[in-house]
Amino acid sequence: MIKLTDQRIAVTGGAGFLGQVVVNMLEKKGCREIFVVRSKEYDLRKQAAIKRLYQQVRPNMVIHLAASVGGIGANRDNPGRYLYENTIMGLELMEQARHHGVTKFVTVGTICAYPKFTPVPFKEEDLWNGYPEETNAPYGVAKKLLLVQSQAYREQYGLNAIYLLPVNLYGPGDNFDPSSSHVIPALIKKCVDAKRQNADSITVWGTGKATREFLYVDDAARGIVLAAQKYDKPDPVNIGAGFEISIRDLVAMIVKLTGFKGKVDWDKSKPDGQPRRCLDTTRAKAEFGFEAKTSFESGLKKTIQWYIKYGRP
């Protein structure tokens, strides 16, 4: 087990939605040397910027959270960008890590790496049994490549690189921009804004038949920190809550919790995305004792309250 208080840790994406919670959790663990990697200071798409980062910060550990990512619409609009930027960031960060004395590299991947028709619950062994769902395949494949890199660099260079597969995240501080947000913040925004504006309906993409699993951001951060501390194997690990809910039931839940009284119109011309998502989380529990603690309704209430207080129509 790594003593985190002895580490100088660089967190890419450390100022983002998940990153801020990870950094806060590391601080609570007593870590004194945490460097938040910000894109305005270090463009991680550029090799020179990554070299400069390692030379200036000299981290022992890297937690790679940074990503170019969005919901179904954003993935459809940016397949090339998401493929290139996520691939190049991960490849160069890990390549330069081995040249600059990094002893542990934690890659946070994505559930989008799984095949479109993965049997539920998703087991890590199923990761290579098919192609990802088409709308987010470029992003998923880019992130899955980093698993291959992690395993190859462990074998050839002895780099302690681990790979985590978190399910869809949500919570206070999430991205509520309709052009790039994921399903929960998008629905919360629709309902709260419609209520504020006395609108009589909202429109939701798809049929509502697809299912998803969601993990509260604090739980995700705790899982990542536990893995950084305790997990040192090449096999990928799911980080999730272990439950499944249909988009139709999710919409009904958010409508109820926000108090929106209008009609929900389903735009069936828009894609559902992957048919089902639900993770098998037994490996995370067995390897480093991770289990999600936040109930879904409680997490939704906190997220809605945050948007009501801080969000804008």
Image (spheres, grey):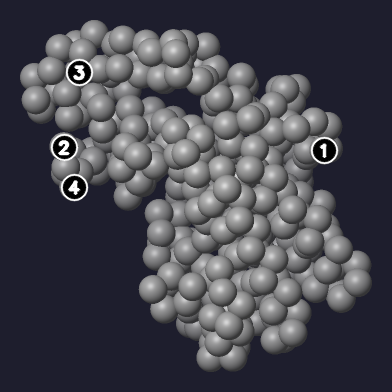
Q: Which mark is residue 310?
A: 4
Say which label, 3 or 2, has the lower sequence index. Answer: 3
- Identity, as a three-letter code, of the amino acid under mark 3: Phe
Which quarter of the rendering shows the C terminus? top left
Point out residue 113 in the picture as x, y percentages from the top left corner.
68, 40
Could you tell me which residue is drawn at 65 percent across and 58 percent down?
Answer: 87
Could you tell me which residue is drawn at 80 percent across and 73 percent down?
Answer: 159
Point out residue 167 in the picture as x, y percentages from the top left corner.
58, 39
Count residues near mark 4 (Cα–Cα under 10 Å), then give few for <14, some for 14-19, many for 20+: few
Say which label, 4 or 3, has the lower sequence index. Answer: 3
Count residues near mark 3 (Cα–Cα under 10 Å), then give few for <14, some for 14-19, many for 20+: many
Point out residue 130 in the picture as x, y percentages from the top left corner.
80, 31
**Residue, disc 1:** 128
Count residues near mark 1 (Cα–Cα under 10 Å), then give few for <14, some for 14-19, many for 20+: few
Point out residue 201 in the picture as x, y percentages from the top left corner.
21, 13
**3D distance between C-alphas at marks 4 and 3:** 18 Å
**3D distance between C-alphas at marks 2 and 4:** 10 Å
- Identity, as a three-letter code, of the amino acid under mark 1: Trp
Count residues near mark 2 (Cα–Cα under 10 Å), then give few for <14, some for 14-19, many for 20+: few
Confirm or deny contact between disc 4 and disc 3 (CB under 8 A): no
Number of residue marks: 4
Say which label, 3 or 1, has the lower sequence index. Answer: 1
Q: Is residue 121 visible?
A: no
Confirm or deny contact between disc 4 and disc 1 (CB under 8 A): no
**Residue, disc 3:** 260
Q: Nearer the viewer, mark 4 or mark 1?
A: 1
**Residue, disc 2:** 313
Could you tell me which residue is drawn at 55 percent across and 25 percent down?
Answer: 273
Which quarter of the rendering shows the N terminus? bottom right
Which element carries disc 2, helix, strand or loop?
A: loop
